[in-house]
Image: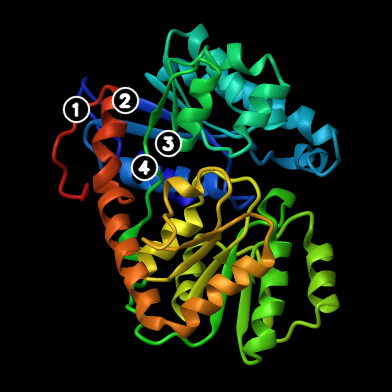
Amino acid sequence: MEAVQARAESLHVTHNTRARRVLIVGPSRRFLGGQAVQAERLLRRFAAEPGVDVQFLAVDPALPGPLAALQRIKYVRTVVTSVAYWASLFARVPRTDVIHAFSASYWSFLLAPVPAMLVGRLFGKRVYVNYRSGEAHDHLTRYSHAVPLLRVAHDIVTPSGYLRDVFAEFGLHATVVENFVEIDRLPYRRRTELPPHFVANRNFEAHYDVATVLRAFARIQQQVPHATLTVVGDGPLRDELHALASELALQQVTFTGAVPPERMPQLYDAASLYLNSPRIDNMPNSVIEAFACGLPVVTSDAGGIPYIVRDGENGRMVAAGDPDALANAALQLLRAPDEALRLADLARAECLSRYTWPAVRDRWLALYGAEARTSPRAA
């Protein structure tokens, strides 16, 4: 993220009063996740746009010297990091035109986007909340303060029609601008044959339910003993998931731990099918990355996934929390590679039309109030 920010700053538009100064506020890449990935992609793309002058502000700044030691102490780190974050907002917001604040749910919502919204409004800036959490409905139901706080923003921007519909239930307007993949950085191939090599790529959080992938793979391996599974991710359930893999006596399972985005292409390329089994979700980057790579997708139907995956049209989709159904759908594709290829081809075509930078560029620029002028590096 730091390298991308340096590149962005080196490409600042000068002597152009029409360039919109945009401050993207979000998590750094110190903790890998979908928000950090999308923030980095936006920074990289906007750096090449003549209509915007883009900068990045981390909600979790790494502090220098003795303060860094304080960030290793539970609870204390929240206080010192928040103080540093608020100070950065007051220093940098006055010098920008538009605040683009990434948002999750619950406490993260209060600690990260809310300060950016409040400081942005204080200085009369245009404020957008880029809300990305599949837990939105529960968040807005359980925490009554969230709805009026979201009204502080000029608009809510979300990557899925699912969240747009959730916000509408609470009387909130949201604009959809989908996630996008760096299509030129992902290896695409048509899988005319399907050796039984599976990949899953979600953090080890309860709502992503990686346990169901492991249980489904146990059923797959009963019928295809030489099947392999690469499990990408890390998180609080690491020990529990490793123990489950041992309990299920799984063979040929590789836990990679957290993997930076630049390493994911080779893992996608080595696989034949993508497995995904969340119980709560919005618009997972990993699914559209699988689309881009030509990987057939077998997924649960949690949250916003039915807005991007249509069973039998561009992937296979089953009920969340059902390892038997997940395994059966995967086995059906293994036994019918022509069908898997058909689904993957349609998914790839949809990715190219909906989930690439050219597909979303003008909508971001319109939100920012920037001119969508042609740039040789914008395509």
- Residue picked out by circle 1: 371
Tag in front: 1 or 3: 3
Residue drawn at the location 74% of the way across and 51% of the way down: 206
- Residue picked out by circle 3: 161
Q: Is mark 4 on a helix, strand or loop?
A: helix
Tag in front: 3 or 2: 3
Q: Nearer the viewer, residue 254 or 9?
A: 254
Question: Where does the image place residue 350, in percent across and percent down from the top left?
Answer: 30, 56
Say what amino acid the circle numbered 2 marks.
Leu
Residue drawn at the location 83% of the way across and 78% of the way down: 246
- Residue picked out by circle 2: 367
Question: Where does the image place residue 277, in percent across and percent down from the top left?
Answer: 62, 59
Q: Which of 161 and 97 is in front in this view?
A: 161
Say what amino acid the circle numbered 1 marks.
Glu
- Residue picked out by circle 4: 8
Real-space CA distance between mark 3 and mark 2, rounded to the nearest whole angstrom: 17 Å
Q: Is mark 2 on a helix, strand or loop?
A: helix
Q: Are marks 3 and 2 in contact (CB under 8 Å)?
A: no
Earlier along the polypeptide chain: callout 1 or callout 3?
Answer: 3
Q: Is residue 214 left or right of residue 152?
A: right
Real-space CA distance between mark 2 and mark 1, rounded to the nearest whole angstrom: 10 Å
